[in-house]
């Protein structure tokens, strides 16, 4: 636990535990908490943070968002700019962000207030555990995993979020026809994702290989780093089958004409 984690760990109870250490998809990053972030955690966590009591059991998503609407799970929301942007543009759906980086949690809380968003909640938790222990089957309209850590060294590949067992877990929480949308700027991980997602018997690729960049995905902070380094961005959009024998839901419209300058506003803010 870093110094920045202590205030949120005290509020949420999430932190190092005894027993066998699971293989995590993240490494704790040291981060400073600015006064704006401390203030956001203290004032806004009770309103927009997801309470995860010790007792096991699924979250009541309707109660959490105070309305019934399709839910999008945003795994590893980072500093939260892209999550806030998507939620603002998509008021008909609820966005459940999950992040372990305390300054990122705090920043998204501040953005929720600044932008007057009512359809965003954030969990301070390991997303794998949250999905496994707190989300019932078929409760999600979409899962987003945008620029998950690539873990490039072979001995770390087991830490990658996109693994057969973790994909099966995520897919089980999607409604039939729900979307698993991943993006990465790491070519070898992109190919690994494509092979892993294609091998899942209940997922169907909405495109032939990688997806054209969808206009609804704002440029994220990590994506911008990749673009500045000259890396290629890959999107992967898979649909949960509606039944074992059925074909996938119709693919989202192609958006092959996307150009980075269409997202200049977002990029300028990052
Ligand atoms: C490379 S960053 C990408 C952040 C953001 N999606 C973006 O594109 O700017 C990956 C993020 O995922 C978070 N993360 C990794 N594994 C996670 C997990 N199991 N649960 C929650 N967050 C996780 C990390 O803390 C980090 O903020």
Image: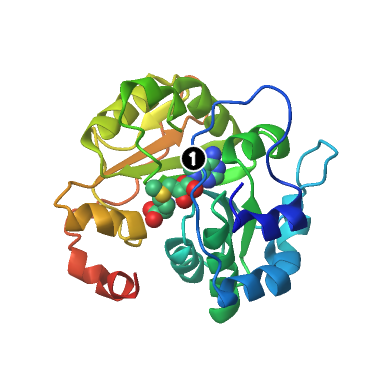
Q: Which residue is disc 1 drawn over?
A: 27
* Viewport quadrant of the C terminus: bottom left
Closer to the camera in the image, 252 or 139: 139
Quarter residue 39 falls in: bottom right
Tell me, yes or no, if residue 118 can be seen here.
yes
Quarter residue 258 falls in: bottom left
Q: Residue 114: give x, y in percent of width and height.
A: 55, 80
Name the secondary structure under disc 1: loop
The image shows residue 40, relative to residue 186, as above or below, that is: below
Q: Residue 46: give x, y in percent of width and height.
A: 76, 66
Q: Residue at x 26, y 56 (%)?
A: 225
Q: Residue at x 49, y 54 (%)?
A: 77
Question: Does residue 78 appear left or right of residue 59 in this picture?
Answer: left
Quarter residue 149 falls in: top left
Closer to the camera in the image, 107 or 90: 107
The image shows residue 147, relative to residue 108, as above or below, that is: above
Task: Report crowding for label 1: few under 14, some 14 to 19, many 20 or more residues within 10 A (C-alpha).
Answer: few
The image shows residue 15, relative to residue 205, as above or below, that is: below
Q: Residue at x 70, y 65 (%)?
A: 45
Question: Does residue 71 appear left or right of residue 46 in this picture?
Answer: left
Closer to the camera in the image, 230 or 175: 230
Question: Does residue 109 appear left or right of residue 143 in this picture?
Answer: right
Q: Residue 151: give x, y in percent of width and height.
A: 36, 33
> Looking at the image, what colour scheme do you see?
rainbow
Q: Residue 148: give x, y in percent of width and height.
A: 40, 42
């Amino acid at each position: 636990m870093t110094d920045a984690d202590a205030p949120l760990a005290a509020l949420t109870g999430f932190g190092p535990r005894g027993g066998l250490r699971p293989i995590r998809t993240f490494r704790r990053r040291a981060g400073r908490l600015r006064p704006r972030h401390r203030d956001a955690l203290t004032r806004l966590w009770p309103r927009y943070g997801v309470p995860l009591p010790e007792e096991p059991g699924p979250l009541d998503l309707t109660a959490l968002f105070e309305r019934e609407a399709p839910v999008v799970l945003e795994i590893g929301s980072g500093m939260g700019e892209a999550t806030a942007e998507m939620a603002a543009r998509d008021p008909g759906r609820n966005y459940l962000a999950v992040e372990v980086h305390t300054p990122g949690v705090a920043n998204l809380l501040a953005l929720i207030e600044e932008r007057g968003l009512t359809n965003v909640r954030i969990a301070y938790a390991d997303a794998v555990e949250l999905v496994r222990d707190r989300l019932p089957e078929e409760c999600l309209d979409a899962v987003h995993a945008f620029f998950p850590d690539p873990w490039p060294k072979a001995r770390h590949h087991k830490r990658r979020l996109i693994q057969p067992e973790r994909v099966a877990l995520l897919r089980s929480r999607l409604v039939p026809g729900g979307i698993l949308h991943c993006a990465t700027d790491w070519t070898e991980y992109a190919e690994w994702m494509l092979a892993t997602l294609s091998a899942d018997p209940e997922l169907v690729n909405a495109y032939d290989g990688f997806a054209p960049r969808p206009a609804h995905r704002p440029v994220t902070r990590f994506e911008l780093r990749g673009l500045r380094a000259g890396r290629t961005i890959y999107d992967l959009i898979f649909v949960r089958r509606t039944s074992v024998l059925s074909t996938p839901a119709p693919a989202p419209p192609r958006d092959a004409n996307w150009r980075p300058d269409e997202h200049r506003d977002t990029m300028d803010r990052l």
